[in-house]
Image (cartoon, helix red, strand yellow):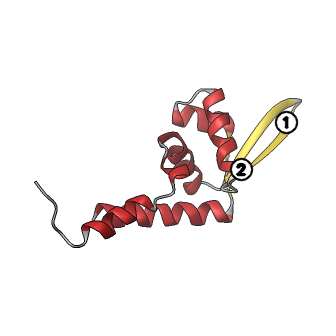
Amino acid sequence: MPVSDSGSSEELQQIAGIDRLIHEPARLMIMAYLYVVESADFLFLMRQTGLTPGNLSSHTSKLEAAGYIEIVKEFVDKKPHTMLRLTDAGRGAFQDYREQMMEVLR
């Protein structure tokens, strides 16, 4: 069925404007979990997302490089402990992503 709606070009532009860094499914899960909590540790995110340690580390590194999350590594009882949280920029980017997706899906 051909699309002749004059708004279709605008709709395609909305899709093109979606943050691709967040849109990737694994990173979307990470961002969504971090959006609803103040912070989370690495093992919690690994269990919740079902990602392997290597995959989670790779995706969180990309989000950290973009300034979306903060990663704090410390030792607790001589064991490494990694905490992650959204930055203000990450929280804003996720809110923008949600709004763009809702608009696209209307």
> In front: 34, or 64?
64
Please state, as top left, top right, bottom left or bottom right, where the C terminus lies in the image. Answer: bottom left
Where does the image place residue 27, in percent across and percent down from the top left? Answer: 55, 44
Whichever of callouts 1 and 2 sits on the residue coming sooner in the sequence is: 2
Measured as percent of width and height from the top left, residue 9 is found at 30, 67
User: In the rendered image, which residue does mark 2 sit on?
Assistant: 65
Q: Nearer the viewer, residue 50 or 40?
A: 50
Residue 104 locus on image (x, y percent)? 33, 63
Q: Residue at x 67, y 54 (%)?
A: 66
Amino acid type for the residue under numbered disc 1 = Val
The amino acid pointed to by label 2 is: Ala
Q: Where's the N terminus, which quadrant?
A: bottom left
Report, in whole angstroms, how far the alpha carbon at label 1 lies from the one at label 2.
Answer: 25 Å
Instruction: Tell whether label 2 touches label 1 (CB within 8 Å).
Output: no
Residue 13 tag number: none
Question: At 56% across and 56% down in the image, what residue appears?
Answer: 35
For mark 2, give the secondary structure.
helix
Instruction: Write down the residue under mark 1.
Output: 76
| Count of numbered tags | 2
Residue 55, given in percent of the width and then of the height, sits at 61, 31
Residue sitting at x 38%, y 65%: 13
* Secondary structure under the numbered disc 1 in the rendered image: strand
The residue located at (51%, 52%) in the rendering is 20
